Image (cartoon, helix red, strand yellow):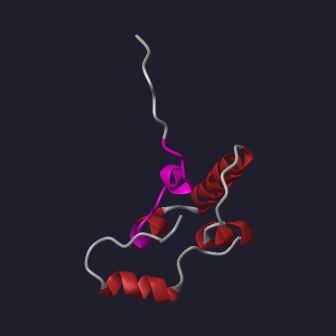
Amino acid sequence: MKMLLFQKSLTFHDVAVDFTWEEWQLLDPDQKNLYRDVMLENFSHLESVGYRASRPEALSKLERGEELWTVQEELHSLVCAGKTKYPSI
């Protein structure tokens, strides 16, 4: 009996880890650096197997060594009900 497997294309969103602002604040600098390294490596691996998509802004921020969360995003998360996650990682 032959079984057909259908594979859906993997996206960066499938392998990315999202943090709320509150969760991000609990990470120490070493944990944030590890997160940056893993996210950049994941994107690099996807590109190496033919993934073609624009680099998410959050990933570009990580690459430049910038903080993911700005004061404006922090205020927005405090105003909005529920958990706000950083978009498009």
Above or below — where is 87 with respect to 70? above
Toward which corner of the image does residue 19 lie, by quadrant?
A: bottom left
Give x and y (percent) for residue 78: 34, 83
Above or below — where is 49 with respect to 40? above
Toward which corner of the image does residue 58 lie, by quadrant?
A: bottom right
- Residue at the spot x=74%, y=46% of the render? 48
Give x and y (percent) for residue 4: 44, 25
Left or right, residue 11 beside residue 77: right
**In magenta segment, residue 19:** yes
Above or below — where is 74 with respect to 86? below
**In magenta segment, residue 52:** no
Give the residue at the far top of this rendering: 1
Helix, strand or loop: magenta stretch: loop
The answer to which of 24 and 16 lies nearer the viewer is 16
The answer to which of 89 and 72 lies nearer the viewer is 89
The answer to which of 7 and 28 lies nearer the viewer is 7
Give x and y (percent) for residue 17: 49, 55
- Residue at the spot x=70%, y=43% of the render? 49
Left or right, residue 23 beside residue 12: left
Marks counted in the figure total: 0
- Residue at the spot x=61%, y=68% of the render? 56
- Residue at the spot x=71%, y=51% of the render? 47
Give x and y (percent) for residue 16: 52, 54
Quadrant holding the N terminus: top left
Left or right, residue 26 beside residue 83: right
**Over which residues does the magenta segment extend?**
8-22
